[in-house]
Amino acid sequence: MNRADLHMHTNLGDGWISPARVVREAERAGLSVIAVTDHDHLEGAKRVEEQIVARQSPVRLIKGVEVSTRNGHLIGLFVNRAPKPMRPVQESIDAIKEQGGLVVVAHPMGRLVPSLSRRKIDELLGGGYQIDGLEIYNPSPANASRRAEVAAANRDWGLAEIGSSDAHFWQHIGAGYTLFEGDLRTAITARETQAGGQEKPPVRLNPASYVAQCAWSWFVDPPRRLIRRLGPPTTERARNAGT
């Protein structure tokens, strides 16, 4: 079966992985498909796409985004633009679907990072909002403590099983993965994927690495995201308007 890692972060977001390293480690891990899902923008995905072309890598890229909604994080796959952050989750789902994307709930019911609760997922599905997949396996602490509960809930929901690394360090790429046959999008929509990664614990890094990455996530990445949302400086906008 083919193997995909559908949730990872680059150093253009809150991760510590360069786009070039993403491609090298994806090849090393034997991944056929990756999705780069930085928070609220696609710049990391675009840079990784450039590296794949330059290396003539066999790894296929899906452009993705981890959306910061008011109700928790949500992943959009097969997207070309990032939904606006901090909107109700319903609006984020609509924005992903309007561009033909697929919706995956990241680290559902997680307690350490903003995550959709079981009640919210029930509410969305009951209200007719289409959720395509659920992260059944994510090796990060945000998911590990709720993994059995998530798997049990999905026996009722019947969403596509997604496994992913949520990698912020290159050592973790491929630590969680999604198994599929044929076309990935078709496999997700048909609910024929399998979550994997449980058989091998992710590499443990020096605690200082995690502390530094958290500081990067809290103090460096948010201002960069704000700058991206505001757009280029006023003089540049004016110059572009005149051309």
Image: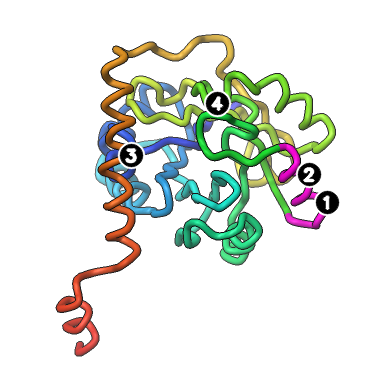
The answer to whether residue 15 is above or below residue 199 is below
Rounded to the nearest whole Å, what is the CA distance between mark 2 and mark 3? 30 Å
Position in image of residue 161 (x %, y %): 68, 32
Position in image of residue 167 (x %, y %): 41, 29
Q: Amino acid at mark 4?
A: Asn
Nearest-to-viewer mark from 1 and 4: 1
Q: Amino acid at mark 1?
A: Gly
Kindly identify the residue that appears in the image at 63 percent across and 57 percent down.
93
Q: Which residue is the site of mark 2?
A: 122
Query: Was residue 126 drawn as part of the magenta stretch in this picture?
Result: yes
Q: Identify the element where label 1 is drawn.
A: helix
Q: Amino acid at mark 2?
A: Asp
Which picture quadrant has residue 187? top right
The answer to whether residue 62 is above or below residue 210 is below
Kindly identify the residue that appears in the image at 32 percent across and 58 percent down.
226
Q: Which residue is the site of mark 3?
A: 218
Q: Which residue is the site of mark 4?
A: 138
- Compare marks 1 and 3 and give the one earlier in the sequence: 1
Position in image of residue 126 (x %, y %): 83, 51
Position in image of residue 1 (x %, y %): 61, 25
The answer to whether residue 19 is above or below residue 236 is above
Kindly identify the residue that appears in the image at 67 percent across and 45 percent down.
186
Q: Quadrant of the C terminus?
A: bottom left
Which picture quadrant has residue 81? bottom left
- Compare marks 2 and 3 and give the one earlier in the sequence: 2
Q: Identify the element where label 2 is drawn.
A: helix
Look at the numbered discs 1 and 2 and tell me whether their residues touch, using CB distance below 8 Å.
yes
Q: What is the magenta segment's predominant secondary structure?
A: helix
Q: Is residue 38 left or right of residue 106?
A: left
The disc label shown at residue 184, or none:
none
Q: Amino acid at mark 3?
A: Trp
